[in-house]
Amino acid sequence: MKVLCIGHAAYDITTPVDMFPKENTKNRVPERIECGGGPAGNAAYLLGKWGVDTYFAGIVGDDLYGHRIMGEYNRVGVHMDYMQMSKDHITASSYIIANRENGSRTILTYRPSDMQMEDVEFQITPDIILVDGQEPEISKKAINQFKDAISIIDAGRTKKAVRELCRMVDYIVCSKDFAEATSGVSIFDQESLEYAFHKLEEEFHTCIIVTLEATGCAYRNEEGKVEIVPSLKVKAVDSTGAGDIFHGAFTYGISQNWPMRKILRFANLAGAMSVTRVGGRNSIFELEEMMEVYNEAQ
């Protein structure tokens, strides 16, 4: 089973604080956590760490951060046949303030506006394709070329290119913010959730999963009802990467051919467990630990 992840690769620098700093003040922080990041990038790292035959297609700069990201992928066995290093751009970077008090994170990301992958010729035949919309042309090419592959999009942004990809994939796994902005419906109860699903399905004609942060996620079950799959209640210290980890775990479940409800329960747990640690990739638990938590939660 081969998985091809296409999209954003960045280098994250996280500073945990006990409360969000006031504007126009100087603050000394006790620690700094660094690791690679990006939605599809984090999902690829998780899949490699969990033993899936994973390829990542993205672009980094030929610089310190770019080489560090490549080193991380090497350590978990992610193939980088389609990873590009640009001598004309610096690696995208994210600066993250993690508020330990409530688990929220504030992210400032810089990526050169003209930084895009060059065309690639895929020499593999993936079984699953996960895209995050950052590399729309390469993503479209892969989805069109490998029509038998199961295709998934991590839909977080409402850009035109992301919505175009949403019309091409088998699964849209989107944030509540994306669902609300795209459907024009404010989700606050079961009725509004069902109406948002109706509007999304009307536009995209595919399977929709909406992540609802600490609440869990929602999908249309086999009986045709929009069902909320609850998440695990934990003490959050940093929510960085939780959505990426959810998408990675969702893709893992698809690769194992699990029933949808099991996939969503497992992805919820992976996302929830991740917020108990600081940093994105540092928050990906070992697969064995996740399976133990899943079995105990049954």
Image (spheres, rainbow, N blue to C red):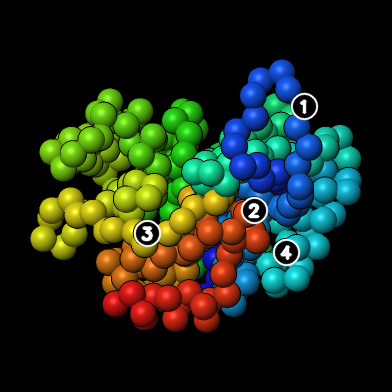
Residue furthest top as drawn:
24
Q: 17 or 196: nearer the eye?
A: 17
Q: 221 or 115: nearer the eye?
A: 221
Q: Is residue 8 left or right of residue 236?
A: right
Give, as a three-letter code, the residue at label 2: Gly
- Which residue is denoted by mark 2 in the rendering? 279
Instruction: Say which mark, if any, is on residue 26.
Output: 1
Give, as a three-letter code, the residue at label 3: Lys
Give, as a three-letter code, the residue at label 4: Tyr
Q: Earlier in the sequence, mark 2 or mark 1?
A: 1
Residue 283 in view, yes or no: yes
Q: Earlier in the sequence, mark 4 or mark 3?
A: 4
Q: Quadrant of the C terminus?
A: bottom left
**Distance from the alpha carbon under mark 2 to that under mark 3:** 19 Å
2 vs 3, front mark: 3
Q: 214 or 77: nearer the eye?
A: 214
Residue at (23% x, 35% y) in the render: 188
Give, as a three-letter code, the residue at label 1: Lys
Instruction: Say which mark, if any, is on residue 73.
Output: 4
Q: Position of residue 197 (x, y in %)?
A: 22, 41
**Distance from the alpha carbon under mark 2 to that under mark 1:** 22 Å
Q: Is residue 77 above or below residue 10?
A: below
Q: Position of residue 152 (x, y in %)?
A: 43, 54
4 vs 2, front mark: 2
- Which residue is denoted by mark 3 in the rendering? 233
Residue at (86% x, 35% y) in the render: 88
Q: Is residue 51 left or right of residue 198?
A: right
Residue 142 in view, yes or no: no
Figure quadrant of residue 150: bottom left
